[in-house]
Amino acid sequence: MKPAEFKAWRKMLKLTQKDAAHKLGLKSRIIQYYEKGERNGDPFEIPKAIELACYAITLGVDSYSGPDVGKKPKKKKG
């Protein structure tokens, strides 16, 4: 995810930098680094985990506790 894509994601969801930080469990300053793509003149990349978290938030997932261990997986037909 590129800085412009991250910022577009945040704005699409109408989140402030503070709101995005809260949803992602980060400090607001990190959001600023992600959107700028640098920190103190050095490149600052958006980790894959954050990219995936953005996707999950877009789908409405606010938390995830892992698979339901009491359920058996469904068998695929075919």
Image (cartoon, rainbow, N blue to C red):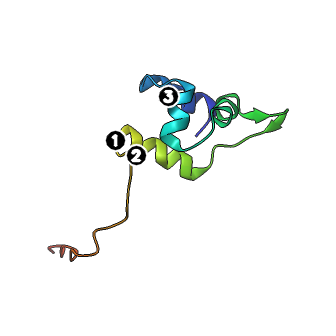
Q: Nearer the viewer, residue 67 or 9?
A: 67
Q: Is residue 77 left or right of residue 34?
A: left
Percent of width and height locating residue 16: 52, 23
Label 2 to label 3: alpha-carbon separation: 13 Å
Q: Quadrant of the N terminus?
A: top right
Give the numbered dot on residue 24: none
Q: Is residue 30 left or right of residue 50?
A: right
Q: Badge 1: few (under 14), some or many (20 or more) residues near its Cα, within 10 Å?
A: few
- Identify the residue position indicated by label 1 in the image: 59
Label 2 to label 1: alpha-carbon separation: 5 Å
Q: Is residue 42 left or right of residue 33?
A: right
> Number of callouts in the render?
3
Farthest left residue in view: 77
- Residue visible at 53% across and 45% down? 51
Asked if residue 1 is positioned above or below residue 52 in the image, the reply reads: above
- Identify the residue position indicated by label 2 in the image: 56
Q: Cβ–Cβ below 8 Å for labels 2 and 1?
A: yes
- Residue visible at 56% across and 28% down? 18
Can you tell which quarter of the image residue 7 is in? top right
Give the numbered dot on residue 10: 3
Identify the amino acid type marked 3: Arg
Identify the amino acid type marked 2: Ala
Element on which disc 3 rests: helix
User: Which of the two labelled residues, at mark 2 and mark 3, occupies the earlier sequence position?
Assistant: 3
Identify the amino acid type marked 1: Leu
Q: Cβ–Cβ below 8 Å for labels 3 and 1?
A: no
